[in-house]
Amino acid sequence: MSELEAYRNLRLAATQSASDNMSRPSRSVEVDSALAADLVAALPSRRSVKYYLPEPISVDWLGGIQPTLQSIDQQLSGGRAALRFICAFSNIEGRTPGLYELGTDGWAQMSVPLESSDLRTMTLQPEFGDAALIVVLVGSLVDAVEHEGPNGHRQLLQRAGAIAEVVWLAAVSEGYAASIFAGFLPAELKSRLGFDGIDSLQLIAIAIGMEDAERLARAEREAMGALG
Ligand SMILES: Cc1cc2nc3c(=O)[nH]c(=O)nc-3n(C[C@H](O)[C@H](O)[C@H](O)COP(=O)(O)O)c2cc1C
């Protein structure tokens, strides 16, 4: 095949793939309209905050939106194994620090020891370990690939990304500061919870707390100083 023919074939394949994508139904999801309005209102003030004060926060709002998060997941997954919500409570009103799972019956503390001070060594960026709450979204790569083939991993990431954005905006709507981030070091999840990265794969995490604006200003001054 000449170079020109190969180029023509590639263009044809690309055009075909683009038109396939356009004819595919969009994956919009139904969300409770009051919550949707809160999330939209929070959007302009949503920014990534990575420095947190040692102040407690509530998790009632997160428990309250659990059915919505689960519904978004089901709508996007078409009935695949649900994502799991593993939450590290470091500084939560009325709760002892520890690892909790948020499920259909609410919060369940996991029988895994966790001190608030552990979080700084469980994250690659220790500043995220100061957050009052870290929410980790966990999925099954085995289930996703078994049912969706090679697209399984990408679809898991899409589901987790959509839910993480909702958690982030809901936290902002509550007056908290937050950031999506990579989550816990895989070795920590393996040793503490037995997560193997296949049946139980951390997809994304959200750190949530009260913003430490002074520390952010200091970090920005230091960064500017380093630039000269
Ligand atoms: C999928 C995703 C993963 C991210 N992971 C990290 C991370 O591991 N560490 C980090 O410092 N920021 C992380 N961020 C936050 C980005 O750094 C931040 O959103 C970006 O700097 C833009 O800032 P803004 O959100 O305030 O506009 C992540 C953001 C997204 C959307």
Image: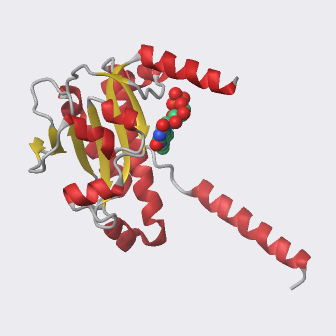
- Examine the image and state in which quarter residue 177 appears: top left
Residue 162 percent location from the top left of the image: 41, 43
Q: Residue at x 20, y 57 (%)?
A: 193
- 185 horizontally vs 7: left or right: left
Residue 187 percent location from the top left of the image: 32, 58
Q: Nearer the viewer, residue 98 or 17?
A: 98
Residue 159 percent location from the top left of the image: 39, 50
* Quadrant containing the N terminus in the rendered view: bottom right
Q: Is residue 104 above or below residue 35?
A: below
Q: Is residue 8 above or below residue 183?
A: below
**How many numbered badges does the structure rendering display?**
0
Q: Nearer the viewer, residue 45 or 118?
A: 118
User: Can the viewer see residue 67?
Assistant: no
- 88 horizontally vs 106: left or right: right
Query: Which color scheme is applied?
Result: secondary structure
Residue 52 percent location from the top left of the image: 35, 24
Q: Nearer the viewer, residue 20 or 172?
A: 172
Question: Which residue reaches farthest bottom?
Answer: 1
Q: Nearer the viewer, residue 129 or 76?
A: 129
- 226 horizontally vs 212: left or right: right
- 224 horizontally vs 46: left or right: right
- Examine the image and state in which quarter residue 196 appears: bottom left
Q: Residue at x 62, y 62 (%)?
A: 20
* Quadrant containing the C terminus in the rendered view: top right
User: Can the viewer see residue 86?
Assistant: yes
Q: Residue at x 46, y 49 (%)?
A: 27
